Amino acid sequence: MSNDFANSQESDNIDKNHLGATPDRADTQPILISEQQRELQRRRNMKRAVMLLNYMFFLLYGLITMEILLELFGAHEESEFKIFLDTITGPFLSPFHGLLFDPQIGPFRLMLSFIFALFFYFLVHMALRGFLRLIAHPIE
């Protein structure tokens, strides 16, 4: 009888060892899961940050492109929509006014300065994405 009891205790220990319930494994297992969850959450947050960054820059690209097209087609400066668009894009385009020669024929003007601004903001966008990628994937 005592031999059967010893064998059952031994088999219980083997089963516990097999399932990873030893004291050294039991302490590290929750830590690994927690680290994995933190890493997953960090990646999700970084992905959302990149999505937000992309959205903001695509919105800016669209507004600048509308400004370029309205100038190219000779939109009236007194139009409420043109005034609204000038107000929104003003802070982003004012540093580029007069940077390049903007050819004009009558009311139609090709805003090369604004096209350069579009290119500049594209470079800033790519640089910020690269920076976020460096943060998201640290060298170990």
Image (spheres, helix red, strand yellow):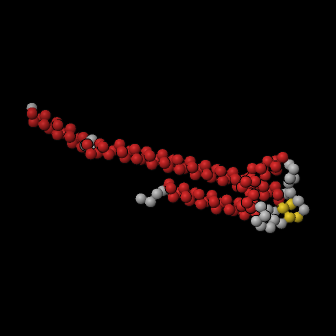
Farthest residue to the bottom: give it.
101
* Residue 40 against residue 68 in the figure, above or below: above
- Left or right: 123 as drawn, with respect to 35: right
x and y, in percent, of residue 127 in the image: 59, 60
Farthest residue to the right: give it.
106
- Left or right: 21 as drawn, with respect to 120: left
x and y, in percent, of residue 100 in the image: 77, 67
Residue drawn at point x = 87 percent, y = 50 percent: 78
Q: Depth check: 46 or 83 in front?
A: 83
Residue drawn at point x = 82 percent, y = 49 percent: 83
x and y, in percent, of residue 39 in the image: 45, 48
How many marks the image carries: the answer is 0
Q: Quadrant of residue 118?
A: bottom right
Residue drawn at point x = 29 percent, y = 42 percent: 26
Image quarter of the C terminus? bottom left
- Left or right: 26 as drawn, with respect to 116: left
- Left or right: 17 as drawn, with respect to 61: left
Residue 49 appears in the rendering: yes
Image quarter of the N terminus? top left
* Residue 127 against residue 13 in the figure, above or below: below
Residue 112 appears in the rendering: no
Residue drawn at point x = 48 percent, y = 48 percent: 42
